[in-house]
Amino acid sequence: MTAPAAPVRLLLADDHPVVRAGLRAVLETEPDFEIAADVPTAEEAVELAGRLDVDVVLMDLQFGGRMLGSRATAEITGRPGAPRVLILTTYDSDADILAAIEAGATGYLLKDAPPDELAAAVRAAAAGKSALAPTVALRLMDRMRTPATALSRRETEVLQLVADGLSNAAISKRLFLSQATVKSHLVHIYSKLGVDSRTAAVAAATAQGLIRR
Amino acid sequence: MTAPAAPVRLLLADDHPVVRAGLRAVLETEPDFEIAADVPTAEEAVELAGRLDVDVVLMDLQFGGRMLGSRATAEITGRPGAPRVLILTTYDSDADILAAIEAGATGYLLKDAPPDELAAAVRAAAAGKSALAPTVALRLMDRMRTPATALSRRETEVLQLVADGLSNAAISKRLFLSQATVKSHLVHIYSKLGVDSRTAAVAAATAQGLIRR
DNA sequence: CCCGCGCTCCACCTTTCGATTGATGCCGGC
DNA sequence: GCCGGCATCAATCGAAAGGTGGAGCGCGGG
């Protein structure tokens, strides 16, 4: 309140012009924030995060469907002396959250957050503290309580094809497997997800963000 | 450019504070626009649209999951001397678009639209002209070309339960039907969607935005 | 007034799926 | 080195789901 601390330098990355403008408008009213730049692509975010000497990067996860926000996060946080990355996205899909945190994100916020919560999260991130939206935190707790929710790569692959509407026969051809193997994977998937049919598995996996839609 | 026309009075309705701020920031730079108010709920939009004498309402369709943006649109446009309603939403789901247009929306834009496109759409709407984002227009064209993509209410209901992972038996109990009826609906659904299994039907319907996820 | 469509239901038959059990090779950690 | 998880495949059996061909009822438009 009294001593004017060094301003927090921010980089905004979001492909929606309206959201960028909104973040600018909201965050510029905070006297201790300084917006170094805003960019519409993850690539530019990676580049400028290194060049501009920012403290916190506010990053969307969905860039025009190309979804490399988590990779961009990994690249930014992987460098020495890297800024903190705050994920700011519309949806709270489990897989997204996990991916972002694994990629080294400091926090995860939803875009419907009120301005003061947003500012608080940015300050927390700048101080190196983790900041999770309540909804997100709850989801993570859920995740911890349910241990069997981790599908293997192959299982995810099979389930994705199921979600695309393929039959076991079609999946076996696509993946060069026997139908027995596909069935075997499905049995394991069902038991991990606690369901007993392909459609229920797709519903559960979609709800938990384990597969894309 | 020369004669200062009467300003276009706007009402913004979106549950995301950041988006509201962004729209304000983007639209306030247009000298012929005047933002009468911005509100976070569909209910307030309905109320203020009548009281404030605005020309154009910019409305989100998804309000915190409660999804009554289209109903709000219908209520606003149903009154005499009503303002034009421009839908401004994140996703381009077919069902949403159709519902909005049926509700009397003048245009349908995606939130990733650049500011100038947005301003142009608002001016078009104010002049009573329809404004559709190119992506949306394309989808509508697709819809026109494919005639059999309209599921009946009951069929949609059944398919939604299928997508939720229920078996035919479970669906029949839920809807107080015989399994024969459920199967019958499914057969019709398959033929309309051009598929031959429940999972494929869910995939197709999801891709076309016929059911919610 | 009748036709079409949406909604409901029935029977029969085929195919697919799911449940169970069991087996093999591979890899990584304790 | 052994154990556990992953990926692969096999056989069998009962249960769902899909395919076919009807049929009756109500409602709204030509």
Image (tube, coloured by chain):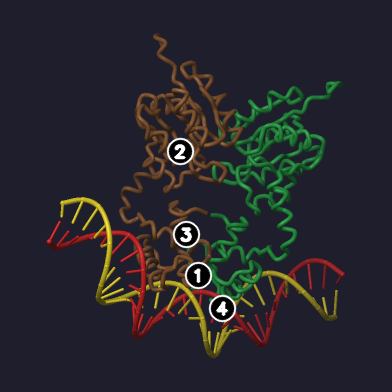
Chain colours: A green, B brown, C red, D yellow
Chain for disc number 1: B
- Residue C21, by quadrant, is bottom right
Q: Are marks 3 and 2 in contact (CB under 8 Å)?
A: no
- Residue that carries the numbered disc 1 in the rendered image: B170
| Mark 3 and mark 4: Cα distance apart in space | 30 Å
Measured as percent of width and height from the top left, residue A16 is found at: 56, 35
| Amino acid on which the number 4 mark rests in the picture | Ala
Q: Residue furthest top?
A: B2
Chain for disc number 4: A
Mark closer to the chain start, 3 or 1: 3
Q: Is residue A10 left or right of residue B189?
A: right
| Mark 4 and mark 1: Cα distance apart in space | 28 Å
- Residue that carries the numbered disc 3 in the rendered image: B160
- Residue that carries the numbered disc 2 in the rendered image: B72
Q: Are marks 3 and 1 in contact (CB under 8 Å)?
A: no
**Which numbered dot is residue A180?**
4
Q: Are marks 4 and 1 in contact (CB under 8 Å)?
A: no
The residue shown at (52%, 54%) is B213
- The image quadrant where one finds the N terminus of chain B is top left
Q: Which residue is nearer to you in this view: A173 or A153?
A: A153
Measured as percent of width and height from the top left, residue B64 is found at: 57, 43
